[in-house]
Image (tube, coloured by chain):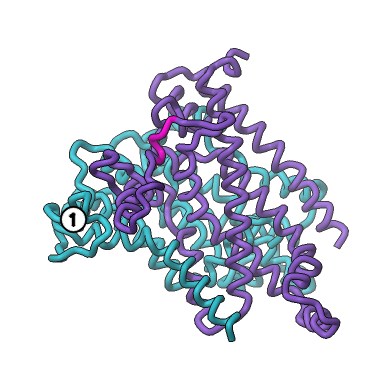
Amino acid sequence: MRLFEDPRFQTDLWNTLYFTLFFILGCLILGIILATLIDRNLKASSIFRNIYLFPMALSFVVTGAVWRWIFAPGILPNSPQGMNLLLDIVGLDLLQWKWFTSTESFLNFNVALIPVIVAAVWQMSGYTMAMYLAGLRGISQDLIEAAEVDGATGWQIFWKIKFPILRPITLSAMIILGHISLKIFDLVYAMTGSGPNNVTDMPALYMFETTFRANKYATGSAIAIIMLLLVAVVIIPYLASAFRKEKRV
Amino acid sequence: MIKKIVTYILLVVFALFFLMPIYVLLATSLKPLREVGLEKMWFLPKEPSLDGFAKAFNRLAPNLRNSFILVIPATLLSAIIGSINGYVLSKLKFRGSDLLFALVLFGMFIPYQSVLFPLIRFLQDIGLYGSLWGLILVHVVYGLPITTLIFRNYYSEVPTELIEAAGIDGAGIFRTYLKVLFPISLPGFVVVVIWQFTNIWNEFLFAVTVTSDPTKQPITVALVNLAGSQVVEWNVQMAGALLAALPTLVVYVLLGKYFLRGLLAGSVKG
């Protein structure tokens, strides 16, 4: 297996690991916050729900094109662009950096991935919100009222009642998001490409280049098979347990 | 009361985050080229102009057409076949039908990359490589897991007695489907069609690998090529991105409720 000795592929695996981790965390946290806010059922909450969900209707390619421009760093410090320019306007120059063109890394985490993660969370967190919202709406109001009568605070109700009920949804969401992030391609390809020193490279990009740009079919197929195995490890136990549950009902 | 105000503030702050790229998209695409300069990217256009849209439309119109030619038959075919699959897998149980269903579902999660190379060899063998028809075939097949899943869940709500009664009246398997199930399938079809339309319209990897001739490529591929081309006319690019997003956005705005159902069905629970 020479592939695993290939520095570019090693970078890809680290990138996938960190991207998956932060992408899932971001979507789950933002998703549950949004769902909780919307579940308070204020006026116009359905408008907000539609706003949070609409990126799901867009193509990753469109998302990539827009966020590429937003995060294009420009030439620092004299002619900042995009987000850097916005920071300049509001006087937060301190926070300016090279975004997805940065080559710095901590513990093998390439910080250039941060803008890509932001874009991906922007697109997919509406999805986790919708899943959580469906879960929250399913919780019986009697249960909440009973807890309130017993003097439980909002936080206690959330952590002791809602959170445990939402646990299977969290698991489903993690698996769906996980398999999306393991094979992520369109977004990165349209937004940053591989980046300097492959800081934003992913296995899917490497596979695409070796197979369709360099005609190295063997390497390309090897990467593709590793991707399939990674996804299978995540998905098969999930499908198996989903079926067992269905049988029991 | 305070809780209410805080909730609204938070809702609005998050809404700004979600709408910010759309603002950039709109503001930039409506600017004439001389206003596009970097230092003004966060401002509204002073003299709105449709130049960007005109240029983008000029370049992307053939690809938009391709996308429609691709999406419409692929969506309808995968919906119809999925509905028949759903009928068989929910009402005509046979030995191993559950296992078959599980395998079909796994198909939903297979990374496109891992089938890409054999897929292209296959398309070359049957002479469809490089054509929109080849791409339609790919999307029909790859769409079947989700369409089958949605219809199977939908039909499992239909009382089995209805099917059995039709059988007693002498209707065969296909007649039963056509006379009993198909007429009540409209809600299922709406969900499936919207879901497939959105997914196929937005898909990029199959599109870029199966069609290499620029005149045959769908909009997503053309958009990426536009971004990679010589001079960076950001207004044209953003207008192009907006054009590419428009059909699915319109569907979402008009029929969001059904879109949501497709979305939730994808998480297997149904």
**What colour do you see for chain B?**
cyan
Identify the image quadrant of the N terminus of chain A.
Answer: top right
Judge whether residue A101 is colored magenta. yes
**What colour do you see for chain A?**
purple
Which of the 4 image quarters holds residue B109?
Answer: top right
Residue at the extreme right of the image, as rendered: A248
Left or right: B176 in relation to A13: right
Q: Position of residue A47 (x, y in %)?
A: 48, 76
Q: Position of residue A26 (x, y in %)?
A: 58, 52
Q: Residue at x 20, y 61 (%)?
A: B30
* Circle 1: residue type: Gly
The chain carrying label 1 is B
Q: Residue at x 48, y 55 (%)?
A: A122
Visible residue check, residue A58? yes
Residue linked to disc 1: B52
Q: Nearer the viewer, residue A22 or B247?
A: A22
Identify the image quadrant of the C terminus of chain A.
Answer: bottom right
Judge whether residue A223 is colored magenta. no
* Magenta segment, prevailing SS (helix, strand or loop): helix
Q: Residue at x 80, y 49 (%)?
A: A241
Left or right: B37 in relation to A58: left
Q: Position of residue B236 (x, y in %)?
A: 21, 51
Visible residue check, residue B166? no
Residue span colored magenta: A99-103
